[in-house]
Amino acid sequence: MNKLKQRSVGKQVFFTFGTLGAILLIIGGLIFFCLRSIERSNQLQSRALNKLALIHGTALDVGELQTKVLRQLLASDIGEIKRLDQTVRDIEKTNTEELADYQTFLETEKERQLYDRAMQTRKAYWEQTQPVLALGLANRDASPRGVGMCALRRVATNWPTGRSACLGGVAC
């Protein structure tokens, strides 16, 4: 300290500002690296949220698809039947695109296996939905207790929800 007092005022000011500058550079460097870490964390969270949004959208699409298929089967107006059939096909197309987008988010082997299993189940579900749509387009089933409801029940039962959907009290 005694040596510092012996220096001129200009050198003391220069030393003080140099010390403050060095401290500010250290603080700036720490803030820079902290912000980079926060940015990486935000990117990971954003990726996870995108994954969840795609999964949620696909789940909603499946529910809407089942509703539209049932409405098409029960409809009697040919215009409404065709409109519902087109809506079902549009939902299936959207669902296919969302699942293709989701494939880009797969990171682990377990995720890939689950995705492949879901795609196989989805394919089987869509194949079993086709005859139900054909019945609706043919407008053969005017009764909710007829053949169409049995076909729809088989489709709903085979969807991997773990529950059987007995529609309209029909024993098929």
Image: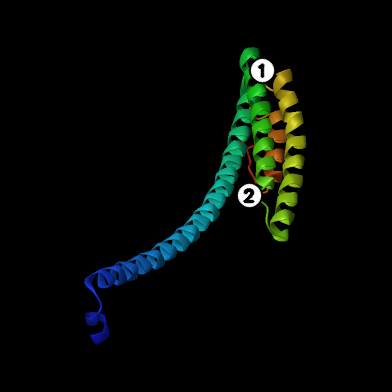
Report if residue 82 is visible in the image.
yes
Residue 90 point in image, percent of width and height = 65, 27
Question: Label 2 neighbourhood size at 10 Å, few (<14), some (14-19), many (20+)?
Answer: few
State how far apart marks 1 and 2 are (Cα): 30 Å
- In the picture, measured across the screen, residue 74 lies left or right of residue 30, that is right
Quarter of the view holding residue 24: bottom left
What residue is drawn where x is 51% and y is 58%? 41
Depth check, mark 1 against mark 2: the one in front is 1
Which quarter of the image is occupied by the N terminus? bottom left
Q: Is residue 72 above or below residue 49?
A: above
Q: Earlier in the sequence, mark 1 or mark 2?
A: 1
Which residue is the site of mark 2?
A: 163
Residue 2 point in image, percent of width and height = 23, 86
Q: Is residue 169 above or below residue 4?
A: above
What residue is drawn where x is 70% and y is 29%? 148
- SS at circle 1: helix
Amino acid marked by disc 2: Arg
Amino acid marked by disc 1: Lys
Residue 89 point in image, percent of width and height = 68, 27
- In the picture, measured across the screen, residue 146 lies left or right of residue 17, that is right
How many dots with numbers? 2
Q: Is residue 132 above or below residue 138?
A: below
Between 124 and 172, the residue placed more toward the observer is 124
Between 6 and 98, the residue placed more toward the observer is 6
Report if residue 1 is visible in the image.
no
Quarter of the view holding residue 86: top right
What residue is drawn where x is 43% and y is 65%? 30
What residue is drawn where x is 59% and y is 48%? 51
Between 75 and 91, the residue placed more toward the observer is 91
Residue 34 point in image, percent of width and height = 45, 62
Task: Give the label on residue 82, or none.
Answer: 1
Question: Label 1 neighbourhood size at 10 Å, few (<14), some (14-19), many (20+)?
Answer: some
